[in-house]
Image (tube, rainbow, N blue to C red):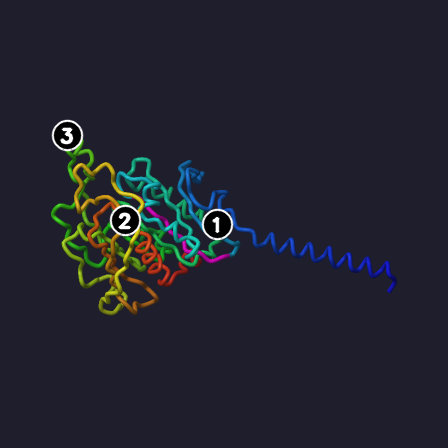
């Protein structure tokens, strides 16, 4: 081989190495999901069929083909997606636990059947962007009326084949509801007129029937919202789970991010006061059939609207991740 041939061969090898290295680097670039920033701020994603928007959080280092857990997080009556995102701040766990969280909103600040198509479109839009085979689990999470809405839609044709679990955040317990505290509900404020108090009160709704399909269920509640937490669960019995086991309490030295500032004159323990540190009791029904998870979490000395603290939020996320998923990958 001549000197010129050696130079030509070496040059070709170097150029080939550069091309391969560049291709590998390109393949490892983080995904820019739906052209949205990885941490939701003022920017929102538009759902094109309705023109409505939603907040989206996902790991900033998300790679193409990576497995994630998808959460559709629904706000309560009179609230918004922005408030819900901070009430249940799962976005703080998105890198550590590989979460994608969509927080939609209702323009009437209360979910109705008119919103169902929009919610389905949001789910389809996010799943298509991720790739169905990359969604290892899909959970509905809802606070208050958002929890009741999750309960209403979970067994509808669209969701029943996709949902792996339902996290109820003060939104109703499956398998036996606890008795509400006598003072539960929005507290009347000083100098509030009868008309204003009536407008602030949510409409009365009947307790819906237990869902007919199967999924994991986690119930979280503030201690002051109820008389006591039931010691048994018909939902756990449905899956042959063991007797309730109390885990070690979750202790938070950091307060949650939000509260209801419009109901602090005077405040009430059952509705919720200012955010502050605290601890939560965790009860799990073990060894459920088909990898289901059934659990109750009671936040001690808390009410309906104090935002969840970081450690109890992470504990809820870990419970969600411990359940078997994969339904959305099989949905047609």
Residue that appears at 22% across and 69% down:
243
The residue lying toward the viewer, choosing from 44 and 291, is 44
Depth-wise, is mark 2 or mark 3 nearer the camera? 3
The residue lying toward the viewer, choosing from 222 and 113, is 222
- SS type, badge 2: helix
Q: Is residue 110 above or below residue 303?
A: above
**Residue position for label 1:** 60
From the top left corner, tell me how far across and down residue 141 is, in percent.
32, 51
From the top left corner, tell me how far across and down residue 164 is, in percent.
36, 58
**Residue position for label 3:** 193
The residue lying toward the viewer, choosing from 257 and 47, is 257
Please tell me which of labels 1 and 3 falls first in the chain. 1
- The quadrant in which the C terminus is found is bottom left
In the image, is residue 72 part of the stretch drawn in magenta?
A: yes
Please tell me which of labels 1 and 2 falls first in the chain. 1
Please tell me which of labels 2 and 3 falls first in the chain. 2
From the top left corner, tell me how far across and down residue 311 is, in percent.
32, 55
- SS type, badge 3: loop
Mark 1–mark 2 distance (CA, rounded to whole Å): 28 Å
From the top left corner, tell me how far across and down residue 147 is, in percent.
27, 49
Q: Main secondary structure of the magenta part?
A: strand
Residue that appears at 32% across and 58% down:
315
- SS type, badge 1: loop
Q: Which residues are magenta?
A: 66-75
Residue that appears at 48% across and 50% down:
60
In the image, is residue 181 part of the stretch drawn in magenta?
A: no
């Amino acid at each position: 081989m001549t000197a010129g041939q050696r130079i030509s061969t070496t040059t070709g090898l170097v150029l080939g190495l550069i091309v391969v290295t560049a291709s590998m680097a390109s393949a490892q670039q983080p995904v820019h999901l739906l052209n949205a920033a990885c941490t939701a701020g003022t920017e929102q994603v538009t759902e094109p069929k309705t023109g409505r928007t939603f907040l989206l959080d996902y790991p900033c280092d998300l790679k193409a083909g990576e497995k994630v857990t998808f959460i559709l997080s629904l706000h309560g009556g009179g609230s918004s997606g922005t408030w819900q995102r901070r009430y249940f701040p799962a976005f703080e766990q998105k890198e550590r636990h590989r979460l994608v969280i969509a927080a939609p909103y209702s323009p009437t600040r209360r979910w109705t059947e008119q919103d169902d198509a929009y919610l389905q479109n949001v789910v389809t839009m996010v799943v298509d962007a991720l790739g169905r085979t990359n969604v290892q689990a899909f959970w509905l999470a809802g606070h208050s009326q958002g929890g009741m809405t999750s309960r209403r839609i979970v067994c509808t044709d669209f969701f029943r084949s996709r949902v792996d679990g339902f996290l109820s955040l003060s939104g109703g317990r499956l398998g036996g509801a606890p008795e509400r505290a006598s003072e539960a509900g929005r507290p009347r404020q000083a100098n509030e007129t009868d008309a204003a108090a009536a407008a602030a009160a949510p409409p009365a709704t009947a307790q819906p029937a237990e869902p007919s399909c199967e999924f994991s269920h986690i119930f979280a509640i503030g201690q002051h919202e109820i008389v006591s937490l039931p010691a048994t669960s018909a939902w756990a019995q449905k899956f042959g789970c063991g007797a309730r086991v109390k885990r070690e309490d979750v202790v938070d030295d950091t307060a949650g991010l939000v509260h209801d500032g419009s109901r602090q004159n005077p405040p009430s323990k059952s509705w919720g006061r200012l955010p502050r540190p605290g601890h939560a009791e965790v009860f799990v029904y073990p060894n459920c059939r088909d990898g289901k998870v059934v659990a109750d979490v009671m936040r001690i000395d808390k009410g309906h609207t104090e935002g969840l603290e970081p450690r109890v939020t992470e504990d809820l996320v870990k419970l969600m991740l411990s359940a078997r998923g994969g339904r959305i990958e099989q949905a047609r």
